[in-house]
Amino acid sequence: MAKGRKNGCPVSVADWLIYIMDKSQLEETWVRIYGLTSMTRTISGETEDSSADTDVWSEPYITKRSGTIDLEGVKKVVEATGEIDRGQELLDDYAEQAGCGADATIKIIDPYGRGYIIDTIVTSSEESADNAEQTRSWTLEQVGEAEVIPYVQMTGVGITKGGEPIETLEMTAGGEQEILGIRFEPENASNRRFRVNNSKRAVVRVSDISENGFVLTPVGAGTAEITVTTVNNGCRAQIRVHAVQAGSEP
């Protein structure tokens, strides 16, 4: 199977993590941009001796590098608040600025955990309607060389509830969902992708899987084992879920 393919199909932007720096707070933070459906990145370079970058006889010495990042997606709204996704909102805010105000820092992490930090200028933000779905697009101009983020290997993983590690979970069939988190070792591990295996779907359903965790919904009485396996190094964590019928003793 060719590198960069997943289950026989091309790796999509959904397998990438794309963040934008939020500089509006006292402490700058990375905000993930949700709702993206495609990303196109083009790179161009200028050489010191003005030779073509396709010169077959010698490798040109590149002194400057620039490029363009085109992002497309659907309008993402946070259900709990009705507000637009913070990452998309930041892109729009930068696009409305001029000069230095449009400078945005982007972090891109590919499906294998290789990452880059790129200084950009957000030059445009557009919105359109297609089949009753609002689509968004942004154009960012790269400024200078991308900074390569050092790769950090995964050494361990754990499942948490409320920030605390757990090994068992009691639930009531048809009752409330549980939001579980993932603890990575080390915390700055580069490839944070993982798979979740459910031994008994008639007992519990797994949904809303993200780099931060997942949601469990109790379906029926019984016991199920939920196993998390990291893509990098195959680290594993497991919990046992016991679900009982409402009114029954656990």
Image (spheres, rainbow, N blue to C red):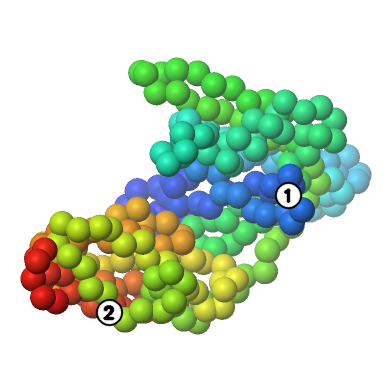
x, y percent for residue 184:
49, 74
- Badge 2 marks a residue whose secondary structure is strand
Residue at 56% across, 78% down: 186
Reading the image, the residue beneath label 1 is 25
Residue at 67% across, 54% down: 29
Disc 2/disc 1 C-alpha distance (Å): 38 Å
Q: Quadrant of the N terminus?
A: bottom left
Q: Is residue 36 visible?
A: no
Q: Tell me: residue 138, above or below residue 227.
A: above
Q: Are marks 2 and 1 in contact (CB under 8 Å)?
A: no
Q: Nearer the viewer, residue 193 or 243?
A: 243
x, y percent for residue 87:
58, 42
Q: Quadrant of the C terminus?
A: bottom left
Residue at 49% across, 66% down: 192
Q: Residue furthest right?
A: 49
The quarter of the picture where residue 103 lies is top right
Q: Tell me: residue 178, above or below residue 90.
A: below
Q: Tell me: residue 128, above or below residue 186.
A: above
Q: Is residue 185 visible?
A: yes
x, y percent for residue 80:
42, 41
Q: Residues within 10 Å of mark 2 (few under 14, many from 20)?
A: few
x, y percent for residue 74:
46, 31
The quarter of the picture where residue 171 lies is bottom left
Residue type pointed to by label 1: Gln
Query: Residue 168 has which mark?
Result: 2
- Badge 1 marks a residue whose secondary structure is loop
